[in-house]
Image (cartoon, rainbow, N blue to C red):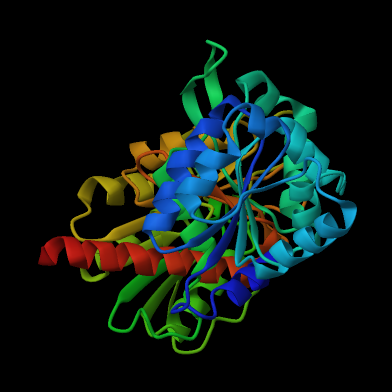
Amino acid sequence: MQPSRAREAGKAKSTPKTIVLGVTGSIAAYKAAELTSSLVKRGYSVHVVMTRAATKFITPLTLQTISRNPVHFEMFEPAKDWEIEHISLAQRADLVLVAPATANFICKLASGLADELLAATILATKAPVLIAPAMNAGMYENPIFQHQMKFLQSFGYFFVEPDTGRLACGASGRGRLADIPKIIHALEQVIYPANDFEKDLTGRRVLITAGPTREPLDPVRFLSNYSSGKMGFALAEAARKRGAEVILVSGPTNLEPPDAVELIAVQTAEEMFNAVVERFPGVDVVIKAAAVADFRPRVKAESKIKKQETLVLELERTPDILAYLGKHKKHQILVGFAAETERTLKNAEEKLSRKNLDLVVANDLTEEGAGFEGDTNIVTFLYPGGAAVSLPKMNKKELAGLILDEVAKLLTAKRDHFRN
Ligand code: CTP
């Protein structure tokens, strides 16, 4: 699984990290110069590998000069050297970054092909691989391409989502290479995961919601959803291990509550709202992993509703807890989830801004291995300003660790902001 590869890469923070930067034949290849320069300035040792097509867009000499290392590309090198080259690069890399990555190159990786140096290096490496796609929006949205990208994610490849905007072909849409700071942010998230057992949340009060809510119809029936509570419980356990004081507000689940966590059991969205809002002023972080029902029956029947030919239910909205917190937040970090079945990123971005969040964890419930009941999830982190990092499929405990890494970074950034 790739995150453990990422952890491997995070071992020796003090020695300069080796980044193998793969550049493929996109018009955005010229941005590899600025990317290389930014990486070198941040102290990375950058070794560029170009595909043959990339050399048509930017010269190896440019990247060689900026990286201060020989640039590798397959041209007329003898087969023996080539063999050594891709293995040694694969072994030396702490991370392989492909930026820009064309649709053709990504699909080639998904097929396990190794017909040139960069693809062979990636096939051979045990280091984490981060891919920054750049292409026309139609190509990016193409279901075949999306399928290949998800296939790679399921094997542990990380992706930096491309930006939306005007593309080289003149059209507008998602496909523009993510901004350099976003790529570097994603790279550092992969390469420097915080140690799970660091007590980096000591002294912090973290409120986590979990599970479904139940909205009663009559004394024996309710409206609810398939949420198991596993994500929220994994977050609560991980936050406590990292030193936080944890309040877990949970709807009904079959899970054993983690040790040393304050559990507040609720049933309805209204009860969850009251429990969370009452404690909100005293906490530093709220992570809303609960799948809160959006509607409830307008009236709860006093006695069991009897069988009848048809039954029309009148539903009303429940309070949107997270939107309320977003409106009233002061010092708190707010993390929301966005469970979607279509247009995942667009809907999640909309929730991020509408609910005034610091981070949204978005997932597409239609993907295999993602969603409510299973032990795994496949998510994208979205940040204010548009940065998005897609993570590979991983179990919910591992994901809890990565979400808390982000929370710890956000808390540190907030503290530094107030100090300066
Ligand atoms: N949420 C909440 N209160 C609600 C509904 C949702 O606090 N009444 C929170 C969830 O816990 C989650 C986030 O808002 O962190 C997004 O939930 P989701 O169900 O994906 O979105 P909704 O805001 O309900 O929007 P929609 O159902 O239209 O997708």
Give the answer, above or below, for where 247 lies relative to 224.
below
Question: Where is residue 150 shown, x and y percent of the image?
Answer: 73, 44
Identify the residue at image location x=35%, y=38%.
353
Identify the residue at image location x=69%, y=43%.
306
Identify the residue at image location x=50%, y=70%.
193
Quick one: 370 or 323, which is closer to the camera? Answer: 370
Question: Where is residue 123 shown, x and y percent of the image?
Answer: 80, 56
Q: Quadrant of residue 142?
A: top right
The total number of labels drawn is 0
Give the answer, above or below, for where 177 lies relative to 14.
above
Give the answer, above or below, for where 89 lies relative to 135.
below
Give the answer, above or below, for where 25 lies relative to 79.
above
Looking at the rendered image, the quarter that the N terminus falls into is bottom right
Residue 110 appears in view? yes
Quick one: 395 or 264, which is closer to the camera? Answer: 395
Residue 336 is left or right of residue 282, and the answer is right
State the residue lying farthest toward the top: 170
Question: Where is residue 186 shown, x and y percent of the image?
Answer: 49, 53
Identify the residue at image location x=55%, y=55%.
214
Residue 339 is left or right of residue 371, and the answer is left
Looking at the rendered image, the quarter that the C terminus falls into is bottom left
Residue 30 is left or right of residue 152, and the answer is left
State the residue lying farthest toward the bottom: 260
Quick one: 369 or 143, which is closer to the camera? Answer: 143
Question: Where is residue 299 shown, x and y percent of the image?
Answer: 47, 41
Residue 25 appears in view? no
